[in-house]
Image (cartoon, coloured by chain):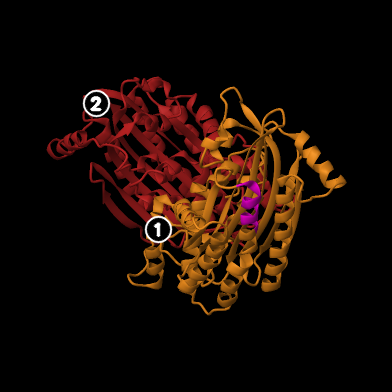
Chain colours: A red, B orange
């Protein structure tokens, strides 16, 4: 789910005018509540990135490497990665901003619901803006779950610069190697509370969407115990301010949703066999990200993208054992059972 | 390149008649030079599988696990895997046979050159046969290269059973972690000799095709030092007997092309840092197979395929380190240089 990090240099014509305008606005007026959503979302996720990185550094004791990168034609990003830390095998927290112009089929691919795009047959490409925060944390301890999060904002405009469409997307999901039910319950409950405060239909819809999206079809298994996922939060759902408020609350809920879990799992004792099982589960994580994830595939197949920012989502290490099957009634089998039949956690 | 292992149960209607007919032929007449190419190719690759497995067991000292599996609607396969051996981290040698019926777009996807398929607009699907041998060997020693090989035969018939099209495909390629030029030269020379004996244009064309196909586009790197690759050896190239003879010679050349290399590398001394580099290269191998390889993607996205036979190609272990760059002028950088600018080895 790193669509926003697909930086499509050679294929797409670019959109420097909007980028320049936004740059000037930032310099002369700053980012205000009256300013463009593009800048407000960018500012918000950069603040959140800093806050999350600080909290994770405090927990881990290690330092994130911070790479700030520019897109020649407008935009850029900040990729923060902590590798081989005390708590985390690999932790990536990235922000990216893209100003460009996208051919219609590429735009259509970036949405689940194409209906609201109203793509006229006589338009070949659209000026396009995307910004988002992506995060994947792979802890060392096999009792501590991997967590993924992504929140993003898209805008298209007509070739003359007038607004065309906007939408928010994102979600978060938890991927344990061992099922510790209270972790799944806490994670889901925290997210559900945020959803319910905005729209009572969000959690049930987005929880289901998450189970369906993060699904390793070829294995017949969900990637993990889920969370929420939504791809098309646009005017048909709610006005833009309300949706921004929802996405802000979702992102602010990340630390409360995950920190209590990692704190109680990071120092749990484990055996070599349990570590091996984690490595096998890591292999399935790689399979999902490289085979099924639309954003990763889109990014990797696009010349000019910053590959290392897209693939920071991969674990430090993974294993593939031919025909590995857990013992019946084992804790390993218990995980597989729940991945094959997603549960309601709250 | 494991197209032949995509066993597409629920999506595709099946082709039991041909399967039954072939089964009867095998029982009553046996496989003769006058019999169908389907049976001759199947018999040949099964013999080769046995021969290769025996040679690798002798080298490694370990035993392959042998799984014979059936396709309910016709066909099946034999998957042989040696895992965590003395010489090989993981070695998979698989044969598969598929009788089915494929929708037109799926058939078109299985070929590079669709022109000779002559797919009429009023035909929605075609009875389809595929058989092939696939092999990937990942040695433990980082000085010993990974090798991949696949040879396959396809046939389609009209819905009334009359022949429609046939073609052979396949190739082999070498993926070292450290560039040992004499290995690349020996591997290419052995293959070139086979090619030249059949058609002087084969090696230069198929060598180039291999460099282009086994290419990690998103990294701007070839997977390894190449070999040969061809996808459409049909009547426009040569008659069927000649092409079968070529494919047979290619497959028979595998042991002579690889055994001298693995024998001289398997016991070479290596450092921990060199093992780490091998693990990073393994990660790129996984990326190619899961992101770019048409056969793997096709198989994994097809419900009902034998996933463990497709993914036996993945290494036992792999690593992803964020922004890992070899030292300038190091042996690691020397490999990268040749992956970015493929060389002529003979």
**Residue B180 in view:** no
Question: Quadrant where the C terminus of chain A lies?
Answer: top right
Q: Which residue is mark 1?
A: B322
Which residue is farthest bottom?
B269
Q: Which residue is pictured at 44% across the width and 44% down the height?
A: A296
**Percent from the top left, x then y, of residue A117?**
37, 23
Residues A41 and B36: in front is: B36
Q: Which residue is pictured at 49% across the width and 66% down the height?
A: B176
- Indicate the secondary structure of the residue bearing disc 1: loop
Residues A52 and A342: in front is: A342
Q: Is residue B316 above or below residue B103?
A: below
**Dot 1 crowding, Cα within 10 Å, few <14, some 14–19, many 20+:** many
Subunit ID for the residue under disc 1: B
Q: Is residue B44 above or below residue B105?
A: below
Which residue is farthest right?
B28
Residues B272 and A186: in front is: B272
Residue B327 appears left or right of A194: left
Q: Which residue is pictured at 58% across the width and 67% down the height?
A: B257
Q: Which residue is mark 2?
A: A159
**Percent from the top left, x then y, of residue B211?**
45, 56
Residue span colored magenta:
B239-248
- CA distance for labels 2 and 1: 38 Å
**Percent from the top left, x then y, of residue A340?**
65, 40
């Amino acid at each position: 789910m790193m669509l926003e990090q697909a930086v499509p240099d050679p294929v797409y014509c670019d959109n420097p005018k909007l980028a320049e305008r936004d740059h000037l606005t930032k310099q002369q007026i700053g980012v205000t509540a009256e300013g463009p959503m593009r800048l407000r979302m960018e500012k918000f996720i950069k603040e959140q990135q800093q806050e999350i990185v600080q909290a994770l550094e405090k927990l881990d004791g290690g330092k994130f490497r911070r790479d700030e990168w520019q897109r020649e034609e407008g935009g850029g990003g900040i990729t923060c990665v902590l590798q081989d830390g005390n708590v985390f095998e690999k932790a990536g927290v990235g922000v990216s901003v893209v100003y460009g112009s996208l051919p219609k089929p590429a735009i259509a691919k970036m949405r689940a619901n194409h209906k609201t795009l109203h793509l006229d047959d006589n338009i070949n490409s659209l000026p396009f803006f995307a910004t988002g925060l992506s995060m994947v944390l792979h802890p060392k301890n096999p009792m501590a779950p991997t967590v993924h999060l992504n929140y993003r904002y898209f805008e298209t405009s007509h070739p003359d610069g007038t607004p065309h469409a906007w939408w928010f997307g994102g979600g978060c999901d938890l991927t344990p190697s061992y099922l510790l039910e209270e972790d799944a319950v806490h994670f889901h409950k925290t997210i559900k509370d945020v959803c319910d405060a905005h729209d009572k239909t969000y959690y049930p819809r987005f929880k289901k969407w998450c189970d369906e999206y993060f699904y390793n079809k070829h294995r017949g298994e969900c990637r993990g115990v889920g969370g929420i996922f939504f791809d098309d939060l646009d005017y048909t759902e709610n006005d833009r301010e309300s949706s921004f408020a929802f996405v802000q609350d979702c992102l602010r809920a990340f630390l409360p949703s995950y920190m209590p879990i990692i704190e109680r799992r990071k120092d749990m004792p484990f055996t070599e066999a349990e570590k091996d099982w984690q490595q096998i589960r890591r292999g399935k994580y790689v399979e999902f990200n490289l085979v099924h994830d639309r954003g990763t595939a889109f990014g990797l197949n696009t010349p000019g993208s910053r590959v290392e920012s897209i693939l920071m989502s991969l674990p430090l290490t993974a294993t593939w054992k031919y025909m590995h099957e857990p013992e019946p009634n084992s804790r390993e089998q218990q995980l597989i059972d729940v991945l094959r039949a997603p549960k309601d956690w709250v």
